């Protein structure tokens, strides 16, 4: 999968209303520093007119929801609606959202910072989450989808995942903002769809998204991912190994490899010969650090033989 910019750079570009390619000077900055910078930007932008927004949010209580929905759509526009939403009572905001056209509601979602409206999002009905997720998927707006994953409850998350096809889900996974939410996504997806995701990743070169998912799994989810790989289309495992080598995501692949059956491990061991001695040594070090080296079987043997 090719992307024009890292997800974190894309998020900052959206906040600043510039193109990601205008932020090329951030390419060498670590994600942790970019996340801190984005937090500062968000606070500055959302707090700049906090007093006015609070007064607007309070005034919204006095108007009937149908009237407020018309004002929101025809006068405020998506950006101001997004800012005011965080200052409104969540139940009132949900009532207004239910009366907005889905395309306009999606425009508002693009302008939201989920941290400012978490309670509002949790008050929305499942069908509204599904409608917005589908439109965002059609628009290929993976950044907005990825931002909301960590703020959806289990029911909302299940509805959103079901609303996206496999390609859309993989591209969203690549841009998930709150990586601590990834295990919850895997729980919702289940082994059968994980298998379909691996097959889709192989067909469309989207393994970097799956490897990013795998990096943040709970220990009890590793076996399910290994089972999904083995049930996927023939050749999927080999392509996954190639992808891990290309993007250096061995930390994601090695725990999965340790859970694979012996014949699959033997297949990975054969591919080790194509890697440079430096890469093999790096893989050995990572496997040791992750505590899976002794479980790699023939892969470990191949690494040790050829790195010697």
Image (cartoon, rainbow, N blue to C red):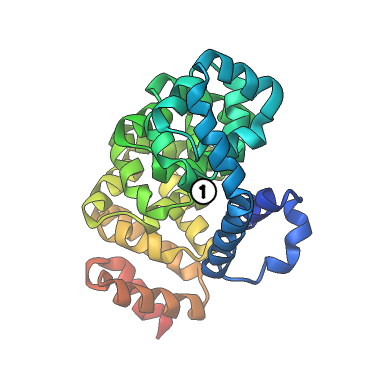
Residue, x 37% and y 79% (percent of image)? Answer: 285
Instruction: Write down the residue under mark 1.
Output: 174
Give me the residue at 49% from left, 75% from top.
279
Farthest residue, direction right: 22
Question: Which quadrant of the structure image shows residue 123?
Answer: top left
Classify residue 80 as left or right of residue 188: right
Quadrant in which the C terminus is drawn: bottom left
Question: Quick check: 24 above or below 156?
Answer: below
Residue 119 visible, this orientation = yes
Which quadrant holds residue 263? bottom left
Mark 1: give few (<14), some (14-19) or many (20+) Cα within 10 Å.
many
| Identity of the residue drawn at 44% across and 45% down | 236
Asked which quadrant contains residue 83, the reply is top right
**Most foreground residue, 131 or 113:** 113
* Vertical position of residue 43 compared to residue 57: above or below: below
Q: Position of residue 276 (x, y in %)?
A: 52, 76
- Left or right: residue 103 versus residue 60 is right
Q: Position of residue 269 (x, y in %)?
A: 37, 64
Q: Is residue 270 above or below residue 277?
A: above
- In terms of depth relative to the viewer, which is nearer, 202 or 289? 289
Q: What element does badge 1 sit on?
A: helix
């Amino acid at each position: 999968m090719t992307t024009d910019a890292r997800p974190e750079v894309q998020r900052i570009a959206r906040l600043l209303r510039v193109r990601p390619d205008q932020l090329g000077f951030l390419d060498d900055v670590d994600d942790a520093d970019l996340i801190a910078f984005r937090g500062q930007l968000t606070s500055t932008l959302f707090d700049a007119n906090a007093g006015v927004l609070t007064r607007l949010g309070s005034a919204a209580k006095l108007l009937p929801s149908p009237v407020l929905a018309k004002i929101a759509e025809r006068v405020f526009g998506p950006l101001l609606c997004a800012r005011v939403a965080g200052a409104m009572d969540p139940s009132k905001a949900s009532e207004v959202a239910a009366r907005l056209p889905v395309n306009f509601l999606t425009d508002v979602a693009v302008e939201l910072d989920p941290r400012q409206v978490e309670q509002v999002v949790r008050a929305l009905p499942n069908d509204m989450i599904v409608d917005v997720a589908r439109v965002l998927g059609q628009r290929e707006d993976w950044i907005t989808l990825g931002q909301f994953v960590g703020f959806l409850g289990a029911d909302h998350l299940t509805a959103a995942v079901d609303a996206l096809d496999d390609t859309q889900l993989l591209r969203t996974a690549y841009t998930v903002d709150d990586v601590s939410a990834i295990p919850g996504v895997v729980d919702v997806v289940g082994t059968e769809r994980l298998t379909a995701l691996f097959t889709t990743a192989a067909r469309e070169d989207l393994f970097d998204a799956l490897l990013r998912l795998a990096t943040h799994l709970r220990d009890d989810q590793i076996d399910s991912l290994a089972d999904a790989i083995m049930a996927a289309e023939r050749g999927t495992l080999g392509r996954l190994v190639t992808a891990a080598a290309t993007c250096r995501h061995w930390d994601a692949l090695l725990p999965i490899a340790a859970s694979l059956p012996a014949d699959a491990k033997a297949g990975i061991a054969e591919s080790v010969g194509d890697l440079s001695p430096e890469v093999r040594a790096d893989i050995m070090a990572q496997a040791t650090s992750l505590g899976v080296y002794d479980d790699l079987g023939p892969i470990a043997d191949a690494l040790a033989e050829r790195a010697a």
